[in-house]
């Protein structure tokens, strides 16, 4: 059994989500967990991010359809936590990796587009049918410029899709043909990898969005706290409204009394129905 200080000492656990063939890392249903770096990414954080990521998928589908002039669908498949080195090692040696700075957060997001899709993104805007086999090679300088325009729009979609969860202003800062050139984080840094299924021209691709975990956690915590406070306030208001309604409909006993008069016992001994007594209570005096 390896020592506790061995960097390779990890315990595997079965993922509670079904992985897609392009999932990170590898493609199996087993992921590594390092007990020296316990996760602070909770299910509540995951729900917030998944909502934003679905919005990102919808917006990028619109962007791709507009730029490539071909209808497409883009859907979130999974969200996983891993290390930066595991992500880089899982990507092909030759691919397309877009880097976007997440101002004002001092961090970088990565968008991975398969090289086959990048070639399609060059072919379609230039009038190609996209039906021919795309070349299996790296992008030329002109092709990089064409894909860069699409990449800028994809990075821009991060801003509006995460509105209400994280406030940032992503800007495309680099394009890399090799994952090792990106240097977006340290090898052991924890990152979140969202896998998407992209369908266009009867072709299916897996795209990835990688977000650094530690820099975005404060923003997620603030969003979560604000939503919990709002829910708590809403419950308090509902309770107060319900309590007021119950009080207003509760049965109560009300009695009023006029000021008494004094007299002799003989005056009241033989009273009968219809007898009238003058009370010492004036009409403008309040009831007791």
Image (spheres, helix red, strand yellow):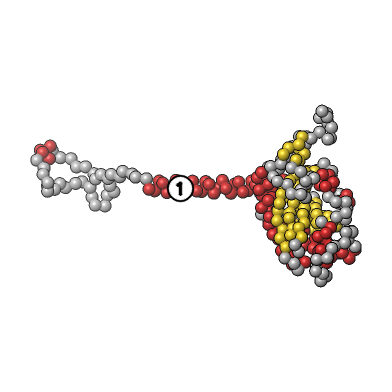
Left or right: 22, with 224 as reference point:
right
Q: Position of residue 171 (x, y in %)?
A: 79, 58
Q: Is residue 267 visible?
A: no
- Number of numbered callouts drawn: 1
Q: Position of residue 154 (x, y in %)?
A: 76, 60
- Which one is in front, 47 or 136? 136
Q: Residues within 10 Å of mark 1 (few under 14, many from 20)?
A: few
Left or right: 198, with 281 as reference point:
right
Left or right: 246, with 175 as reference point:
left
Left or right: 271, with 117 as reference point:
left
Q: Position of residue 268 (x, y in %)?
A: 12, 40
The N terminus lies in quadrant:
top right
Which residue is under mark 1?
242
Which residue is depicted at the point 75% across and 62% down? 202
Which residue is depicted at the point 71% across and 41% down? 15
- Which one is in front, 213 or 32? 32
Which residue is depicted at the point 77% across and 66% down? 68
């Amino acid at each position: 059994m390896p020592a506790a200080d061995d960097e390779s000492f990890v315990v595997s656990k079965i993922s509670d989500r079904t992985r897609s063939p392009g999932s990170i890392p590898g493609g199996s249903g087993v992921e590594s967990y390092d007990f020296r770096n316990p996760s602070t990414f909770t299910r509540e954080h995951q729900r917030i991010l998944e909502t934003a990521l679905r919005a990102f998928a919808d917006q990028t589908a619109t962007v791709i359809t507009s730029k490539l002039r071909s209808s497409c669908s883009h859907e979130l498949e999974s969200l996983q936590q891993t290390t930066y080195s595991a992500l880089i090692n899982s990507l092909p040696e030759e691919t397309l990796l877009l880097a976007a700075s997440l101002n004002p957060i001092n961090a970088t997001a990565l968008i991975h587009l398969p090289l086959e899709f990048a070639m399609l993104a060059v072919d379609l805007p230039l009038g190609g049918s996209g039906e021919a086999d795309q070349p299996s090679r790296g992008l030329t300088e002109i092709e990089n410029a064409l894909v860069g325009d699409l990449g800028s729009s994809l990075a821009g979609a991060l801003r509006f899709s995460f509105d209400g969860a994280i406030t940032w202003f992503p800007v495309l800062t680099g394009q890399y043909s090799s994952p090792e050139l990106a240097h977006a984080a340290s090898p052991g840094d924890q990152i979140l990898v969202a896998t998407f299924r992209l369908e266009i021209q009867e072709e299916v691709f897996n795209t990835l969005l990688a977000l650094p975990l530690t820099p975005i956690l404060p923003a997620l915590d603030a969003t979560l706290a604000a939503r919990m406070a709002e829910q708590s306030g809403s419950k308090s208001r509902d309770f107060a409204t319900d309590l007021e309604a119950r009080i207003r409909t509760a049965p109560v006993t009300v009695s009023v009394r006029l000021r008494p008069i004094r007299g002799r016992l003989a005056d009241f001994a033989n009273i009968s129905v219809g007898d009238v007594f003058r009370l010492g209570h004036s009409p403008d005096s309040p009831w007791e």
